[in-house]
Amino acid sequence: MTETNALPIRARRIHFDYPEGGLQRHYVQGDLLMSHIIAYLSATFPEGEDFFVRSVRRHADRVTDPVLKDQVKGFIGQEVTHSREHVALNERLQEMGYPTGFNDRMTARALARDERLFSPLTCLAMTAALEHFTAVLAESLLGDEDAQALLGSTEVRKMLLWHAYEESEHRAVAFDVYRAVGGTERRRIWTMRMVTLTFFGSVVVFTTLSLLRDRSTYNPVRLVRSLWALRRSPFLKRSLRRRLRQYNKVGFHPNDVDNTALLERWRPELFGETGQLVANMA
C-alpha cells in the first residue's frame, strides 16, 4: 500500500484577467469542439470544487495523521481558489456566447441531488474518483506538448496550466482521506464506475447542447474538421485511457504513478522568478 506523499500543499494567491476582446470566439486554437468542451468543463468547476471541499471537510476531523491533516488544509485552500478563478473565466465565456451559467446551475442541481441520495462516505468516494479524472487530464496537459499547443498563448492557457499543476499536486488528498476514514475498495471502485458513466455522459450531452447554440456548428466543413481533429486529441490517447482505468484495480493509489519530475519541471516554469505566472501572483 502506497504511503501518503509528504510534500506540502499550499494555496497560492493568484488572479487571472480576461479583458473584453482578449479571447477569440473559439479560443482553443480556433477549434470548435474543443472550445465548447473546455467551456463546459470550466462551467462545472465552481460547484464541483465546492462539492469536493464539502465532502472532504465532513471527514476531516477523523483524520489523525498530521501530514494528511496539513494536506487537507492545502487541498481546501487550492480548491476554493480554483472555484473563484473559474467563476471569472465562466463569466467571460458566458459573454462570448457559451452557456456556462446554465451549465453551472445544472451542475449545482446534480450535486445537490447526489448529496441527498448518497451517504457522506460515498460523496467522498465520488470526490476521490473525480480527482483522479482531473489529475490524469492535468498531467496529460503538463506532460504533452500537443496538449499545451491547443491552448495557444492566451490567459486561459496560463490559468489551465496553473490549475493542472495544483490538481497534480493534491491528487491523492481526497483518496487518502477516504482510505483513512475506512472507505472500502468495493465502494471506491463501484463509485468510480458510476462516476465514469455520468462524467462522459454529461460531457457529451452538455457539449452538444452548447454546440447547437453556436452558428459555426452549422458549417459542415468546420464541424467535420473539428470532429476529425478530436479523434487525434492528446486527451483521448490510449495511455490516458489506460491511466483512468487503473483506478479500478484493487490496491490502486494515485501515487503509483510518480509525478515528482513533472512537478519539479513545472514549478520554476510557472512560479519561479521569471515564471509564466509571476504577473498573476498577488
Image: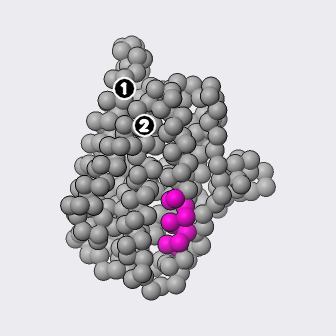
Q: In this view, does 111 lie to the left or right of 142?
A: left
Tally of numbered discs: 2
* Front residue of 99 and 152: 99
Residue density around tag 1, few if under 14, some if 14–19, many if 20 or more, within 10 Å: many
**Magenta stretch: includes residue 74:** yes
- Of marks 2 and 1, the one in the foreground: 2
* Front residue of 254 and 192: 192
Residue at position x 49%, y 72% in the image: 72
Q: Name the residue under label 1.
A: 211
Q: Is residue 51 left or right of residue 145?
A: left
Could you tell me which secondary element the residue under label 1 belongs to? helix
Residue at position x 43%, y 42% in the image: 43
The amino acid at mark 2 is Thr
The quarter of the rendered structure image containing the N terminus is bottom left
Residue 227 in percent (x, y) is at: 37, 26
Q: Mark 2 points at which residue?
A: 100
| Separation of marks 2 and 1 at Cα, in angstroms | 12 Å
Q: Quadrant of the rendered structure where residue 155 is?
A: top right
Q: Nearer the N terminus, badge 2 or badge 1?
A: 2
Question: CB of mark 2 within 8 Å of CB of mark 1?
Answer: no
Q: Is the magenta stretch mostly helix, strand or loop?
A: helix
The amino acid at mark 1 is Leu
Residue at position x 40%, y 69% in the image: 56
Residue at position x 20%, y 61% in the image: 117
Q: Can residue 232 be seen in this view?
A: no
Residue 13 in percent (x, y) is at: 66, 58
The stretch in magenta equals 71-80
